[in-house]
Structures are given as C-alpha cells and as structure tokens.
Amino acid sequence: FVFNLSILLLFGKILFRRFPAKKDAVSFLAKAFAWTLSVLSSSIVLCALFKVGYSTYADRYGYRGTRGFFYAGNDITAVLMVLLPLVVCLALSMPRNRRKKQLIFFIYAAGSTLTALLLIGSKTAFVAAIGTVAVDVIAAVWQAVAKRSFYPVLRFAFIPLTCGSLFFVLMLPDLLAKQEPGIVGQVKESWQVSSEIAQIEGTTVALLSGRQVKMLAVLDEVKAAGPYAYLFGLGRGSQPYTLEMDLFEFLFFYGLIGSIAMLWIYVRDGFRAIIAFFKKPNIVALGALMGLAMTVGYGLMAGHVFFSVTAGFYLAITLVFCNIFFMKDQKEAMEHEN
C-alpha cells in the first residue's frame, strides 16, 4: 500500500522533470499503457495457443480459464481492467493525421486485451470486457457525432475484429486437426459455471467467492473488541489471512480513522477527476474514469487492489494520468510539481 501511495504522490513530479510539457507527459503515459496491455495480454494469448501456464480456477467445478504464468488471476484482471477502457478511448481520439502504425498498435493492444479477459474467464474479467465494450461504444458514437465523421466508429469496429482474429488463430490448431475448437468451449464453460454458481449457491457466493465467510468472522471480532476497534481497527498482523475485500480490510484492520488517513488522497484525486470531467467532458477522461470505477468497485467488493503491488500500481498511475490530463497548461503543471 505504501509503495502504491508513493507512486500516486511522486510519479507525476518525476514525470514532469522528464517531460515538462503536459502533452508530452500524456503521450508518454498513453504509449506506456498500450505497451503494457500488449505485452501482458499477448503473453496470455500465447499461453493459450501453446497450452501452457496456469488455470484461472481449480475448484469444485474443475479447472477452467487461463491466466498464463501470472501468479494471481485477480491481479492481472485488475491491471487489464483499469487500462483497457482508457487505451480504447485514446485510440478513438487520435487525430487522423497521426501515424497509422501507432493507431494500429493501440487497436491491437485493446483487441488482444479483450481476448485475454475472455480467456481468463473469471466473473470480473467478463464484467470488465462487457463494461468496456458498452462504454466504449458510447464513446465511439460520441466522438463520431462530435467530429461529424464515421471514422471513430470504424476504429472501434476493428477492436472486436482483432479479438475475433486472435480467437481464430487460437482455434486454428484444432480446425487443422479436424477437431472441435477447444478454446471456444473453455470460454463457454467459464461463463456457464459462473451462472451455475449463482443459481446453485446464490448470488452472494458467486460474486464474493466465499469471501463473505471470512469477512463475517472478522466482523464478529470487531464487534467483540468494541469502540477502539471501530476507530483504529484490529490491526492487520492479528489476522491469519486477508479478506481480499479492500473496503472491509480498511475498516476492520485499520478502523475508521485509519481508513480516512490511508484513503483520503485517493478520494481527493478521484473526485477532482470526476469534477473536471463534468466541467469539460472528454472521451479520454471517460475511458480513464471507467477503468478506475470498475477497478475500485472490484477492489472494494471482491478483489485485492489497494494492497496489491501489481494492481495498485496501475490504479495509482491511472490517477496520475488523470491529474496530468486535466491540468490546463504547462504553467499549472509546473505549479503542481512545486
């Protein structure tokens, strides 16, 4: 958590020493995000193609999904979730005179990430894929109307086309062997099992994957400890395991005062970005806020974002991007640095 917070506080200042102009800092981060998605998602696609790596789930319903060689499916899903809507909107907003190679690269990064989310096959991955497509369809239409051009919608269409092309490549070995494409069955199985869990064990179990059992046990400890625990928490070291539900970990382990002290900078920067967006709507800002909203919601309810170096790092970097993007000019950027 301290590492992620230090990134939020210091990375923007460091970035402005290298790129004093706001547009250069934004461009650097945009390219970094696209490269991140391209490398991470391509590694998952390649693992699925060569049938190596780890399953996302190995539980009472069997083995399903693929997360490549990433240690935790939750972490990689959160990274893809926070960056995908932003990278899509960056691609939609590129001027037509921008180099075609850069546009193609951004479209590939988005399409391969959409493919990777479907391959991961977790509930959160499906939500991220569906939510991103829904919001970015709106963004594409918005940009098309604003620019009076069909070009943004055409750009967006290439993203699911890229996803479909990658799935065709994944299906190709089975098609050449005249077998039923196994990769389609894997994605379908992941979706069906998520629905079955909700029907058989209830929506709460499906959404929280049993985390509510640990959460209720810790809640009993908090109640037994009394007012002091309400204010300052039980302490993280007193617990044999983590809850993987950030909201309750903050409240139960650090109390009300600790939660406010730890989260107020995130809340401040988040509300600044929201207010700035409503003052001057922009599809790039919409993509950033969509990614942040999904990731924070995931972390608070059923994930492990704020206390994860991987997911928390990209959450902080995306907030830094918002801070820079909404700055008015270079003068304000320099004032922010000082």
Image: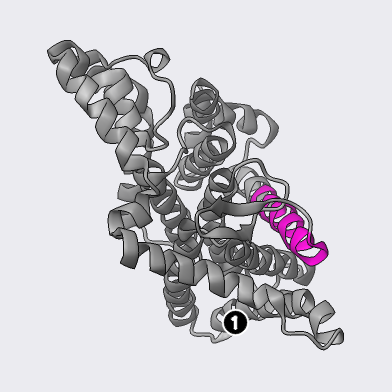
Front one among 301 and 134: 301
Is residue 42 a member of the stretch shown in magenta?
Answer: yes
Residue 108 placed where, x, y %? 71, 68
Is residue 191 a member of the stretch shown in magenta?
Answer: no
- Identify residue type, mark 1: Ala
Front one among 22 and 88: 88
Instruction: Look at 77% across and 58% down and name the residue there.
Output: 47
Instruction: Look at 74% across and 80% down and name the residue there.
Output: 168
For mark 1, does the 10 Å Cα neighbourhood hold few (<14), some (14 to 19), or many (20 or more) residues? some
Q: Is residue 202 above or below residue 302?
A: below
Q: Is residue 242 above or below residue 258?
A: below
Instruction: Please state if 102 lies on the left or on the right of 64 as rendered.
Output: right
Instruction: Please state if 175 lies on the left or on the right of 292 as rendered.
Output: right
Tag 1, which secondary structure? helix
Report which quarter residue 15 is drawn in: top right
Residues in magenta, as a range: 32-51
Q: Give the residue at mark 1.
A: 157
Residue 286 placed where, x, y %? 42, 60
